[in-house]
Amino acid sequence: MRRPPLATALTLIPLLAPALAAEDWPSFRGASARGVADGQDLPLEWDPDGGANVRWRREIPGVGHASPIVAGGRVFVVTAVTAGETELVLGDEGGIDLAADAGREFSWRLYCLDAATGEVLWEREAYAGEPRATRHVKSSQANATPSSDGETVVALFGSQGLVAYDAQGEELWRRDLGVLDPGLYGDATSQWGHASSPVVWRDRVFVQVDRHADSFVAAYDLSTGEELWRVERDEKPVWATPTIDESRDRAQLLVIGGDWDRGLDPRTGRELWRFARDLEVKTTSPFVADGLVILSGGYRNRELFAVSAAAEGMVEGDELVWTSEPGGPYTSTPVAYRGRLYFVTNTGIFNVLDLATGERLHRQRLEDTYSASPVATDGRIVLAGEGGVVRVLSSEPPFAELAAVDMGEPCLATPAVADGTLYLRCRSHLWAVSGRTE
């Protein structure tokens, strides 16, 4: 297999990858996209400049909104590097504007770091050249979070393609998925950037390809990249990551769509159920909690829905368990934790709902705007703000703010939590926050 020019393997890398551990965070929002990790004993406060409770800090070149993942004692993160300043407009100031990336040379890279020390074990340049599609001014050229089973890591670099590596950084296979150009529905010139992340499950990896035409969801063999099945999608494009759920007596792949949300059989792609939700610009990911599929997102501040995870066919009647009031999240995915549902809107409205009924229990305004999804750990909700302040709130009434730490640079990536460590990826750096000394 051809190795990209930047590839350099280090002799210290073990010959075999460790198996995926239960405490790993192997994909976007961790296992089954739940965003929850208890038993971590994270510090309440830390010093981003490398002081108290910061195990390590590593500069990551370029810009990427993809989250870090943790698998087999390693941290994986992707980025897109280009000369000069990369335009990034926070909040809603960018409207529907497109970035001026045409004619610029980028280097799309995957980094592998030692989770304990932050040492870069290897880096790989997956692609180099001009982007095949542009992006929104708030987006990046590296939005999709990698996914791993501890032995293979798969990264999707938008229109540049899908690549799989082993734990030593050897390229296993790559797939050209064509131009991934989702944008304003009905305007083929609008390209806001692809964001849906790959999901590794057993012997396969799932990819949701949404664009202006010829969208699809597909499964690829994790070892070879061979396409196992494909389901065509003739509906409005979205930016949501699919989720695998095995919480009941069947496995299902949860897939958000511009017209329908669906549950698919991950082995064949056969549709198990569908729910009509005709909305534009869905970005939040589906997940299962307490037997409920939580569905949210859509432009803008729409209701949340809870569908029975045992639904069959067209969802109707009792299979739609509850519908919340309007005011749901637009970009970030909620987190279900200890019987409640927590989310924050783009404009900083923090909400708490009763998970069983959808009733709103609490609402308050926070400073900052938000793109990153909240995560829950040990009775706390962690929120990374676009302006760079990471807030820690109590998960119990009155849901008080316990700490606020300024990272000094914008934070748009969802944090990861694994092995007693909070991993924060902001504009230029990746931090490992931990009170443990080993």
Image: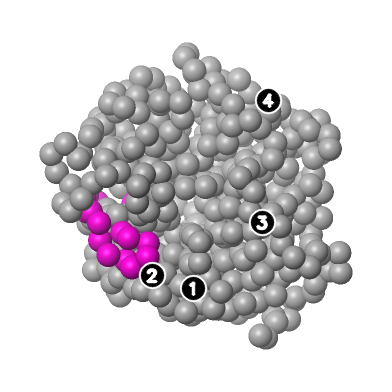
State the quadrant of the C terminus. top right
Q: Please state the extent of the stretch shown in magenta in the rendering.
A: 264-283
Q: Which mark is residue 44?
A: 4
* Residue 50 sits in quarter: top right
Which residue is at 62% across, 77% downward?
172
> Residue 317: x percent and y percent?
13, 39
Residue that numbered label 2 is attached to: 218
Which residue is at 49% across, 60% downward?
201
Q: Amino acid at mark 1?
A: Asp
CB within 8 Å, label 1 to label 3: no
> Residue 400: x percent and y percent?
53, 17
- Is 351 in front, or is 266? 266
From the viewer's perspective, is the residue at label 1 or at label 4 nearer? 1
Kindly state the secondary structure of the residue where label 4 is placed: loop
Q: Reading the chain from its start, which is encountered first: label 1 or label 4?
A: 4
Find the distance from the CA under tag 4 to the CA under tag 3: 30 Å
Q: Reading the chain from its start, which is encountered first: label 4 or label 3?
A: 3
Find the distance from the CA under tag 2 to the CA under tag 1: 10 Å
| Residue 390 highlighted magenta (yes or no) | no
From the viewer's perspective, is the residue at label 2 or at label 1 nearer? 1
Task: Report crowding for label 2: few under 14, some 14 to 19, many 20 or more residues within 10 A (C-alpha).
Answer: some
CB within 8 Å, label 2 to label 1: no
Q: Reading the chain from its start, which is encountered first: label 2 or label 3?
A: 3
Which residue is at 59% across, 26% downward?
378
Q: Reading the chain from its start, which is encountered first: label 1 or label 3?
A: 3
Find the distance from the CA under tag 1 to the CA under tag 3: 19 Å
- Is 108 in front, or is 81? 108
Kindly state the secondary structure of the residue where label 2 is placed: strand
Residue that numbered label 3 is attached to: 19
CB within 8 Å, label 1 to label 4: no
Residue that numbered label 1 is attached to: 221
The correct choice, above or below, for 398 with respect to 160 in the image is above
